[in-house]
Amino acid sequence: MAFGRKRNFNEIHHVPNGNISNGYGRDDMRKKILQHRKSLPIASVERRLVEEVQNNDMLIIVGETGSGKTTQLPQFLLNGGFCRNGKLIGITQPRRVAAVTVAKRVAEECGCELGQKVGYSIRFDDVTSSFTRIKYMTDGLLLREALLDPYLSKYSVIIVDEAHERTIHTDVLLGLLKNIQNARSRSVKESKLENLMLNSEMALEKEKGIQQSLSFLSRCEGVKYPPLKLIIMSASLDARGFSEYFGSARAVHVQGRQFPVDAFYTEQPQQDYLDAAIVTIFQIHLQEGPGDILVFLTGQEEIESVEGLVKQWLLQLPEARRKLVTVPIFSSLPSEQQMKVFTPAPSGFRKVILATNIAETSVTIPGIHYVVDPGMVKARSFNSVTGIESLVIVPTSKAQALQRSGRAGREGPGNCFRLYMESEFEKLADSTVPEIKRCNLSNVILQLKALGVDDVIGFDFMERPSRMAIVKSLEELFLLGALTDEYKLSDPEGIKWPSCPWNLYILKLFSLQMLIAVAMLSVESIFFTPREKADQAKRAMECFSSLDGDHLTLINVYRASCEFLQKSNMESTSSKLKSKKKMRKWCKQNFINSRSLKHALDIHSQIRRHVEQMGLHIASCGDDMLQFRRCLAASFFLRSALKQPNGTYRALSNGQVVQIHPSSVLHGKNPECIIFNELVRTNKSFIRNITRIDPLWLPELAPQYYAAQSYDFELY
Ligand code: CDP
Ligand code: MG
């Protein structure tokens, strides 16, 4: 494939420094780690940073990826005495994988066992103890902690990391932490502050903010806590937005280390960016000098399909040129497997890391000299008029493209191959729109309500979502029965549950089948369809497929896998390793993704344990799948669609025309009426995870919606 003239875009200053490698021998590991820590750009400003935090309750730290913010700052603060009185330093990450990998790394640096002084906590996996002082966690998890401990009283410092990503959790967290910080300093200086506010000319303007903090306070009256230190960290060099939001907070810049990276663009537009990526991987492998390759793809499916094809292509090469290993990394990959990206390739081999945008800033992988960037990312998108959220593959922003190419210049000069033309780069948006402006707000609203913030429209967001989007989500929550007609939580206790992909607690019936379906749908894809074996894979899937749709098909897979496990356990008293191997073989034969299946089985047992702990009765629909489908219809009546004469479907809630995705077992079967979980937009609007229902169930099971709208089913 032809790439155009190279263009140097090293926009960041260049400080030559020694190479850092991860491949230490055991003995000198500690020495190497210490050396490595000292060599990081942030090391020279340790004292200054600690002073800045001492002098400012609110601080913004910006610095290029790899400068040492995430791994070093918490250690500086621990040594600086911020954990006296047994308090913790909490660091939030937008992604589970970052929380886990960084905690492991920092525990290693501190020479302690993970879960002791340094630990992490993510949904369903808490590796901390009463000794833990540095706690890495997802931002979603800290939000949950705030439900139970509104002052976040365990923490003396909270660091919101990767704030530039502006995920929905980060944005909610920023507003919440602002409130908590106010409330905590208020709890100390309560009377003093009150006088100040009364006398202040700005009292009226401030009133809204105070009201919010007060509603907060009302839940924890009479308690006094020391002020909370709040630090926002970001890889984007523009700290203005954060600083303004936090009342002109102080911002400091940590110098990074970045070598020049040459960018190459294709001379022609590429029809298929996956093919282009594979061609480019091999061009680099066969024509360029040593160094690992990092390829940015949009999700698990793409990663697995590219991984399969790279392996096949390798077989066409002479044996001596096959020294290439692929390593995938994406969020739903089990964490032991995610850690493989940090293991150096065997001597003489080149490593190709196939990653989602996880590797943009969250995870710093050593050894990368080449970046291959198709320029695409999977993003959530929400149409506030139709009220439907979908996953779309869209071009990255310029800021993302620069972050991605920067990954090639961490340890020396690098190359980035962008799989689009230079003229396209110029057309990209400068930065990514915050997620809160492009997704369904139902979860946010529920979370805020549970946190005592009743006036969601008046909440002090860093960037306010549109009024329309909020109203639409309020409406949806009311229709689902999660909010009362006064927009209060119908079940204030239920919301405190661990968050589940479908908000378990709004499901109408806790049935065994429902829990299985939730678990199976929490992972990206259970079925694995390699392009070159599509027919075989389809036949394998037919063994499990149910005429009623995808949910029941997934339940069939779950049951079959449990039966297989039981049988193989009974047949032999063989080792765990052997039965794992057998399971993997079974998965392979059935074109099932063994990683996803294992993950789903784990999630299922965890959700089930939780539901049981809550003392809720789990009913089984037994073999009465009609009951299960009615249950789905009652829960997803807002995602229902009716067949039209031309074979496409029309969503009942908004009239949007959608089509059944080819991966659905109902593709080509075209039942009259369906409910669906997911809308994916590529060139068409496809719906996925579909179950056949009876249209007459809708007015019966959701009269609040269908009776009021008086749907005329004959219309379509
Ligand atoms: O947060 P920031 O991007 O500023 O840097 P960091 O994540 O603290 O990483 C600092 C250094 O630690 C980098 O050179 C990484 O390569 C290294 N690191 C590592 O070797 N293994 C990890 N799991 C995390 C970081
Ligand atoms: Mg970081």
Image (tube, grey):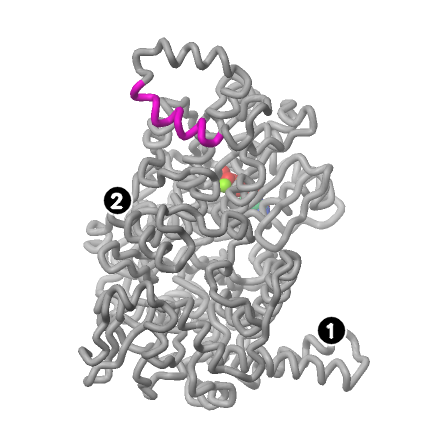
Tell me the amino acid under the disc marked 1.
Leu
Q: Which residue is mark 2?
A: 467
How many discs appear? Answer: 2
| Point 25% across, 58% down: residue | 4
**Are the residues flagged by discs 1 and 2 in contact, CB closer than 8 Å?**
no
Secondary structure of residue under mark 2:
helix
Dominant secondary-structure state across the stretch colored magenta: helix
497 lies above or below 13? below
614 left or right of 191 in image: right
Q: Which of the 4 image quadrants contains residue 15?
A: top left
645 left or right of 505 in image: left
Viewer-proximal residue among 196 and 328: 196
Residue 698 seen in this snapshot: yes
436 lies above or below 630? above
| Point 31% across, 62% down: residue | 392
Q: Which residue is mark 1?
A: 577
Tell me where the magenta segment starts and ends, as one range.
Answer: 204-216
In the rendering, at what x and y percent does residue 369 appear? 45, 53
In the rendering, at what x and y percent does residue 484 appear? 39, 51
| Point 53% across, 41% down: residue | 147
